[in-house]
Amino acid sequence: MAFEGIRRIVVAGGSLAGYSAVSELLAADFSGEIVWVTGEKEGAYSKPALSKEFLQGKSEHSELFLPEIADPRGNLRILRNVKCRSLEAERRIVHLDDGASIEFDGLILCTGATARMPAITRGMEGVLGLRTLEDALAIKAELARRPRIAILGGGLIGCELAASMRSFGFEITLIEGAPMLLGRTFGAVLGDYVRELHERNGVAVLTGATIEALEARDGRVAAARLSDGQVIETDLVLVGAGSAPATGWLEGSGLALSDGVVCDATLASSHPGIYAAGDIARWHNPYYGAEMRVEHWTSASAQGRAAARNLARSGVGSSEAPVAFADVPYFWSDQYGLKLQMVGRHDGHDHIEMQETADRAHPLLTFHRGGQLVAAAGVNASRAVMRYRKQIEDEVKARDRVAEPC
Ligand SMILES: Cc1cc2nc3c(=O)[nH]c(=O)nc-3n(C[C@H](O)[C@H](O)[C@H](O)COP(=O)(O)OP(=O)(O)OC[C@H]3O[C@@H](n4cnc5c(N)ncnc54)[C@H](O)[C@@H]3O)c2cc1C
């Protein structure tokens, strides 16, 4: 691979996108220096496991970590416990929060996202979000008191928290402002299925419900007051209110930002030599002809690798040009021993088909728009969902003549 004129590459962010980018740079035999500013105390770890096996006590702390990256040339410098404080895109300098500054020829931005904590949830003991290993450890530390738990938000994280906490038999109230759980993610049919699943497993589900205030006793949360006047007594509030791209440190850098780092189809930012990958990247997805930011594990991994390859191709005088990154988004969620999966994007669908499955207990749905398959979702139907992923890719490619993803 090329890398013409690129002597030092900084990778910012020590989770999956950063890990994938660094692995790819090393695999591509980049002979210059790679500086990986991880922002982490330890190595890169699996976030999906945090809300599932790890909280349920089925996996140990040490099992969360991704394999160590081999560094055969000795040209990888890993900076832990340090974060990027700011960026001067024009001058190609990253400033770190320990006072150091690093000049670079190439930069891959992988600083991901942070948990959204609504104003009413801030600054009160017994109210916790979940985004990082530290967050998961803080939640685990609360469990010995066998708390009654109110979960704010019925999205993926909120639902997984509810399922994991029910595995200990705790009393759970799941509070969601929208009319259904996971409706935006999975659509109405699966939204109803997920609600039924939680209720069958003993969760009190309140939809269309807004928490107006949290009430404290002796400085610690004691109740959640809803806007309809209902009061839910609780010992612990867990917040699953979505996430926001971690672009704070890039304000004033000169990069185009808009709900993430704005990128073209090749994951290139508005400045030459600067790419973005993972939860932080808002890129033009050629499969959909639209800008999107995808917060899913497999996309972060594929984008990290693609951004590294495109950075290599972007060198002055390179014989290869950067290649568009086209992706049919995919995610999964594990709840009560069931695997829920979705591929594609169902927004704007005009037709849903229930597909026949051998196991009639679990739904498998396809979503269509203008006669085209645009998404599929199912429960315990991995093979079928993956077949639909391929079909969606093929149909979009045939329709829009999209190039193979890089
Ligand atoms: C609890 C949980 C469960 C999930 N479950 C699933 C699932 O089941 N399926 C699925 O598809 N996806 C799931 N996801 C989403 C998936 O984990 C993310 O899409 C993925 O972690 C994104 O990786 P990333 O590297 O882009 O960003 P992140 O994982 O957010 O990592 C960002 C990294 O950047 C570092 N950083 C932040 N700011 C700075 C800075 N200023 N300087 C240097 N470093 C910085 C952070 O320390 C971190 O290492 C889950 C996420 C969470 C939180």
Image (cartoon, rainbow, N blue to C red):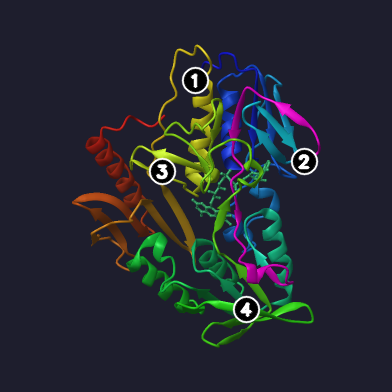
Disc 4 from disc 1: Cα separation? 52 Å
Disc 2 from disc 1: Cα separation? 31 Å
- Across and down, in percent, residue 246 comes to 61, 48
Magenta span has 106? yes
Residue count near mark 3 (Cα–Cα under 10 Å), binned few <14, some 14–19, many ≥20: some
Residue marked by disc 1? 313
Q: Which tag is nearer the camera, tag 1 or tag 3?
A: 3
Of the numbered discs 2 and 4, the one sitting upstream in the chain is 2
Disc 1 from disc 3: Cα separation? 23 Å
Q: Which tag is nearer the camera, tag 4 or tag 1?
A: 4
Residue 50 visible in the current orientation: yes
Residue marked by disc 2? 97
Tell me the tag on residue 291: 3
Residue count near mark 2 (Cα–Cα under 10 Å), binned few <14, some 14–19, many ≥20: some
The local secondary structure at tag 2 comes to loop
Query: Assess mark 1: CB under 8 A from ligand 1?
Result: no
Magenta span has 369? no
- Across and down, in percent, residue 20 comes to 56, 35
Which image quadrant: the C terminus? top left
Disc 3 from disc 2: Cα separation? 31 Å
Query: Assess mark 2: CB under 8 A from ligand 1?
Result: yes
Tell me the tag on residue 213: 4
Which residue range is magenta in the image? 98-127
Q: Residue at x 81, y 39 (%)?
A: 98
Of the numbered discs 1 and 3, the one sitting upstream in the chain is 3
Q: In the displayed structure, does residue 268 sit left or right of residue 377?
A: right
Q: Residue at x 18, y 51 (%)?
A: 371
